[in-house]
Amino acid sequence: MKARELLAACFLLFGALLLWPLLTIANHPVLVGGVPALVLYLFAVWAAIVAVLVFAAVRRRGLENDE
């Protein structure tokens, strides 16, 4: 899969994860380690976005160095 296709797919996936219907799943008065579930959900989605962008950047840099 090309980096551009990966980023487009991730944009759609992460955009969907941040829409209201999926946010309501995590929006319960439950504390996980003293932290609300919604905050943990948002942090996990944010961390996944960062990880995918780092992966795509490293992959792209590796492809540019091979040429």
Image (cartoon, rainbow, N blue to C red):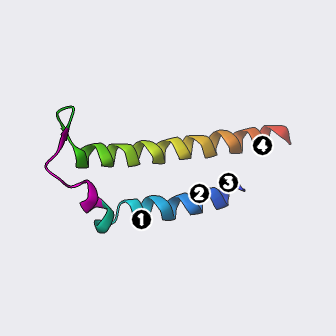
Q: Nearer the viewer, mark 3 or mark 4?
A: 3
Q: Residue at x 86, y 42 (%)?
A: 67
| Residue wearing tag 3 | 3
Label 2, residues with CA under 10 Å away: few <14, some 14-19, many ≥20: some
Q: CA distance from mark 1 to mark 4?
A: 31 Å
Res. 7 mark: 2
Is the residue 44 above or below the residue 33 in the image?
below
User: Is the residue marked by circle 3 packed among few (<14), some (14-19), or many (20+) residues within 10 Å?
Assistant: some
Separation of disc 2 and disc 1 at Cα?
Answer: 14 Å
Where is residue 46? Give x, y as percent: 39, 46
Which of the two discs, 3 and 4, labels the residue nearer the N terminus?
3
10 Å neighbourhood of mark 4: few (<14), some, or many (≥20)? few
Q: Quadrant of residue 19?
A: bottom left
Residue corresponding to mark 1: 16
Q: The residue under label 4 is which amino acid type?
A: Glu
Mark 1 and mark 4 lie on one chain; the one further toward the N terminus is 1
Residue type marked 2:
Leu
Q: Which residues are magenta?
A: 23-31
Outermost residue, left direction?
Answer: 29
Verify CB contact (< 8 Å) between mark 2 and mark 3.
yes
Q: Horizontally, is 2 left or right of 45 in the view?
A: right
Q: Give the crowd class for mark 1: few <14, some 14-19, many >=20 residues within 10 Å.
A: few
